[in-house]
Image (spheres, rainbow, N blue to C red):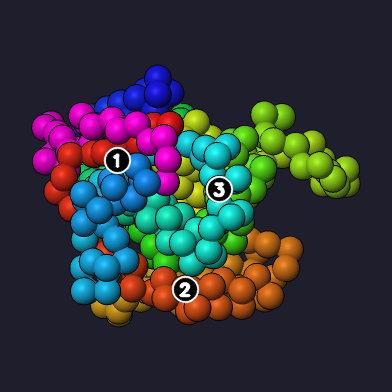
Amino acid sequence: MKKYIIGMLCSVLFLSACSEKISPTQQLMANPTEIKITSLEDLEKVFNDLHYTPGYWDKGSKEVPRLTFEGISPEWQKVSQNMPVNNKKSIFLRLILPLILVSNENILHEREIVKNSKLTSPDLIAIAIKYRVIDEDTEVLTNKLKQKLLKRVNIIPPSLALAQAAEESAWGTSRFALEGNALFGQWDFSGNGIKPKQQRTELGNYGIARFDTPLASVEGYMLNINSTSAYQSLRDLRAKQVASNKTFSGTLLAGTLIKYSERGQAYIDGLRELISYNKLGVTDDTFLSDNNLVHLVY
């Protein structure tokens, strides 16, 4: 819980530093209500109390509660093996979707700062460093660099993030998810990653990046997509859609992820099938409710 609170405070402090006053949405995230979960029944009760069930979705509800959780429970690997597949998927998706929407909300806040700040703004400089447009020694942005930054600071469609989380973590049951909240299979060459059981020595001393919380894993994934050169084509396509006043779905942007996996086109096809089969496209239209943050602990 200590790591979670520190992480949440860091996020709130960073966003607060970028404005003179804390926004209403930041206030909702700043004081979480902690609920202890000891069984699937406890979890389903929380979902039901928050009107966050398949029944509400079937009625057309697109509202998602502000909900986070401290980590992948070891019990999840055990109980998920003995439950219907659809139930396992439903629980996983309902836990991860709020994290995606919270992360996207923070990105949109940053995007507004980028749009409205002067080139010399310290807030703008901080975001440019975060998204690797400049390094820490750079004091001033140019208009060209600001436009480059604007292409990077934008949301990831929830359907795409959900599909990749499901694919990369085996619906939250992988060893990497359990040991390090690793939901997206991001590589880590720092020496601190989780070592694969069969490491390919020709690729160097790599591991799978570990995170203190599932929310941090989602945030790390989005920053990776939004800042590294491998996913420039995704950012270009997204910017093109924005310039044309068009939406960008998870299915559309999935077609740019040829470098995310060694499987190449087969990986893209798999993501698109996952989005289609599980009807994840509807999540691209979801939004966060105005409840105070609920944090689940085990």
Query: In the image, is 239 to the left or to the right of 23?
Result: right
* Rendering quarter of residue 230: bottom right
Q: Position of residue 42 (x, y in %)?
A: 34, 42
Query: In the image, is 253 to the left or to the right of 27?
Result: right
Q: Is residue 28 magenta?
A: yes
Residue in the foreground of this view, choosing between 95 and 25: 95
Q: What is the CA distance from the residue labelled 2 to the residue labelled 3?
A: 21 Å
Q: Earlier in the sequence, mark 1 or mark 3?
A: 3
Q: Is residue 66 above or below residue 158?
A: above
Query: In the image, is 194 to the left or to the right of 93?
Result: right
Q: Earlier in the sequence, mark 2 or mark 3?
A: 3
Badge 2 element:
loop
Return the residue at label 1. Answer: 124
The label on residue 278 is 2
- Disc 3 crowd rating (10 Å Cα; few below 14, some 14-19, many 20+) is few
Q: Quadrant of the N terminus?
A: top left
Amino acid type, label 2: Asn
The label on residue 79 is 3
Residue at image position (69%, 36%) is 194
Residue at image position (38%, 36%) is 37
Badge 1 element:
helix
Q: Is residue 37 magenta?
A: yes
Q: Which residues are magenta?
A: 19-40
Residue at image position (13%, 39%) is 23
Q: What is the CA distance from the residue labelled 1 to the residue labelled 3?
A: 46 Å
Amino acid type, label 1: Leu
**Foreground mark, 2 or 3?**
3
Residue in the foreground of this view, choosing between 31 and 242: 31
* Residue 191 in view, yes or no: yes
